[in-house]
Image (tube, rainbow, N blue to C red):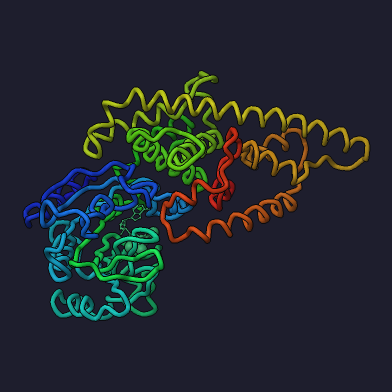
Amino acid sequence: LPTSGDSIRQRFLDFYASRGHKVLPSASLVPDDPTVLLTIAGMLQFKPIFLGKVHRQVPCATTAQRCIRTNDIENVGRTSRHHTFFEMLGNFSFGDYFKKEAIKWAWELSTMEFGLPAERLWISVYKDDDEAFAMWHDEIGVPVERIKRMGEEDNFWTSGVTGPCGPCSEIYYDFHPERGHSDVDLGDDTRFIEFYNLVFMQYNRVTDGSLEPLKQKNIDTGLGLERMARILQKVPNNYETDLIFPIIEKASELANIPYALADDSVKMSLKIIGDHLRAIVYLLSDGVVPSNIGRGYVVRRLIRRAVRIGRLIGIKGDGRGNIEGAFLPSIAEKVIDLSTLIDSDVKARASRIMEELKREELRFVQTLERGEKLLEQMLADALSSAQENGTPPCLSGKDAFLLYDTYGFPVEITKEVADERGVSIDMNSFDIEMENQRRQSQAAHNAVKLAVGDGAELTENIPDTEFLGYDTLSTRAVVEG
Ligand code: ATP
Ligand code: MG
Ligand code: MG
Ligand code: MG
């Protein structure tokens, strides 16, 4: 049985190649598609074929597609299964086979190639999809209590506001079969993980939101490589698989905190760094340049978040004694070491990637340091007015928020520094400022929720002046939480 991430990827591709699929390379993270900002799924490169705009070259294909999902940024490190960067293994039919074969092969792959025990697998189908239900039950033999009918949110897959879509059926792995069959919620991630999604792509969603049937019925699937690796490697989360853990170990070495000894919040920081560095390296490799708009903003946001979190867990300078240095490049080196079978172009681009990363990190550190100066000033003011009034020294929530919002200064750092001077922070009023901010951005966020990774989410609210803050939307609470 395969266990390493690389062997799982290979087995998947071989399995479908031996069933008539053409193995095709991953497309770039920068899609050739104006409606989507970044490649969010394996189907994206085939969209024109699904829509009948381009003639198919082969009846069916299989890929290991690099993906970015910025909509999952808040989940990173919090759930055990979400990344901003991940690989999606997929098999695709362009008007060739449909539901029956897709279901049969997905089951065979899961139980025979990957050796998952059948009784650990649960199935979801779209609420009205009696046909898929019957196939799983009658042909595959999954008992009815392990097949759940679910609604639009989970089981109707769309690639964006418009585009090809259809009902889907997912396979979940059960980590705790001893918990039984009653009151089961497949969304309970202390028990289940969704690993394979089979989309029965029959419709095109058009601009007015209605569904038009496609000329041909297609299959689009996605299996999360990191999730399968986590199951087969029997580790508690995707981050501790061989695909990501070496990157985390590098970061923990620079922070001088062994992962095994770290508390949960430090572990979460290390996981975020592990995740973000992969996303950053592959985005830079595919030609995305840090900036304040669109894709450039995605990579900038990820870089800044990784820098801040690294500083929070105690990485100083380059982590090796040079206080003026950058540390992201040495973690990126690990990502590049691991890249060979994910994207064979990355190694050749390594020096450019490292240069851009270093430049962006150092530029951001300057911004942070300006905030540090301002904080010094604020603390001095707080101390002197406390002395005048005979009250305990306290930094206002407004000040802490200004540092946070405009200077990208984590409130934990503000607190720590203030503490050292014997100054407290008015956290109540800080929280009120945060809440106001959150409410304002939530409205903007809701408007674009449907568009996974859509450009609107990332171009709205972004000043064209020099970027001083860091997260513009609801992602801002993550580091602080
Ligand atoms: P979830 O419900 O867990 O967020 P999803 O339903 O959004 O997953 P799909 O859009 O169905 O995911 O994508 C197909 C597969 O890709 C999933 O079954 C999963 O294995 C993988 N996947 C999706 N999002 C992520 C992510 N953020 N990180 C890692 N793997 C992912
Ligand atoms: Mg999701
Ligand atoms: Mg899901
Ligand atoms: Mg899904």
**Residue at 88% across / 38% down in the picture?**
386
x then y, percent, for residue 245? 35, 41
- Residue 340, quarter of the rendered image: top left
Given residues 390 and 435, the one toward you in this image is: 435
Quarter of the displayed picture in which ligand 2 can be seen: bottom left
Percent x, y for residue 278?
Answer: 36, 39
Where is residue 22 drawn, in percent x and y?
Answer: 11, 50
Can residue 20 be seen at all in this image of the molecule?
A: yes
Image quadrant of residue 140?
bottom left
Q: Give the residue at x 45% y 53%.
A: 75
Residue 237, position as x, y percentages in the image: 36, 52
Query: For this rendering, which residue is in front, 135 or 25?
Result: 25
In the image, 202: left or right of 270?
Answer: left
Depth order, front residue of 432/248: 432
| Vertical side of 376 occupied by 242: above or below | below
Is residue 239 at all visible to an observer of this figure? no
Q: Looking at the image, is 125 positioned above or below residue 374?
A: below
- In the rendered structure, the answer to whether residue 380 lies left or right of residue 64 reads right
As drawn, 379 above or below 298: above
Compared across the picture, whether 417 is left or right of 53 comes to: right
Total number of numbered discs in the rendering: 0
Observer-nearest of 252 and 305:
305
Image quadrant assignment for residue 94: bottom left
Above or below 207: residue 142: below
